[in-house]
Amino acid sequence: MKRPFSETQTDVRRSRERSPHDILGRRRRVGALASVVATYSIAACDLDAGQWGVATQSKFLGVGSVVPWAVPQAGAIATQAYANPRYGSDGLALLREGASAQEVVDRLTTADDARDHRQLGVVDSKGGSATFTGAQCMEWAGGRTGPCYAAQGNILVSAATVDAIAETFERTAGAPLAERLLDCLDAAQAAGGDRRGQQSSALLVVELDGGYAGLSDEVVDLRVDEHPRPLEELRRIYGMHQAIFGKTPREQWLDVDDELGAELRERLGKLGYDGGLGDAFFEWAGAENLEERVDGIERVDPVVLAELRRQT
């Protein structure tokens, strides 16, 4: 069972601690609009896994630095079009106070004089969702919502892009959230995508204490800032991430009997790791960034064993 959300357990992503009441009360004046973040995105959650996340692709440099925002047990936000990045930090502050997705959209856009140029998707702590597309967003622009997801896009080839995101998310229920979000991006691109082309992509998934060593909330935080095929590159990097930081169920780990122990010693010796088997194994795993997949020497993760065999 997941622990209940606590203010002391996590911080709003890329934000300073500020009262949302103060924030919304002073944001009536809007400065010059930034470059348009023409993109498609999905903000979503898996309540059973306790995960929230955002995935996005755009003809825009470094889309991951602007669009995706999420905090565990609170919600996820995608902010785009003539993006207002404060929608991310301010919206998460509201979500942490218990506001629903629709309440967040209403309060953020009401306080923003440039709302007609904004696009926003929000998923809250209970899986409620809302999307907003300003009247002046460049066509095609719009969004769809359903339980646990909000999909949206602007300057798209057609509505088929957002439809593909929504339909893919609904169809892939039960799969890991990160993989569902990647599938949504691929489906969106296959349906037409950003009519200007491709440039960058990002994937963010958070879970309370679900990140590195149980000391981080970011399960996956990957960006492709500039690439001719950013979705292919994002999936390639995700595969590397899973090989290093993924978790193989313990029932699939292998017992280290005398035969396997002898094999480990031989292979580690070929790589220059001698001494006690436990120490040599952990030293090698650490050098390969696989230490999160090692827990003693009585049993071995098959992913780690496969990498050792590959190297020798």
Image (tube, helix red, strand yellow):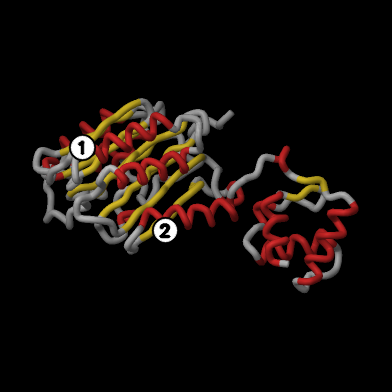
Residue 182 has which mark?
A: none
Residue placed most toward the observer, 234 or 134: 234
Task: Give the x, y percent position of residue 292.
Answer: 65, 53
Task: Give the x, y percent position of residue 30.
Answer: 12, 49
Q: Amino acid at mark 1?
A: Ala
Residue placed most toward the observer, 187 or 143: 187
Going from N to C along the chain, the mark reached first, 2 or 1, is: 1
Residue placed most toward the observer, 88 or 202: 202
Task: Give the x, y percent position of residue 1.
Answer: 59, 28
Task: Count residues near mark 2 (Cα–Cα under 10 Å), then give few for <14, some for 14-19, many for 20+.
Answer: some
Q: Residue furthest front?
A: 190
Q: Quick check: 205 above or below 44? A: below
Contact (Cβ within 8 Å) of mark 2 with mark 1: no
Q: Residue at x 83, y 70 (%)?
A: 274
Which residue corresponds to mark 1?
A: 159
Locate the C terminus by quadrant.
Answer: bottom right
Q: Amino acid at mark 2?
A: Glu
Which residue corresponds to mark 2?
A: 233
Using the numbered discs, state the Cα–Cα distance from disc 2 to disc 1 in whole angstroms.
25 Å
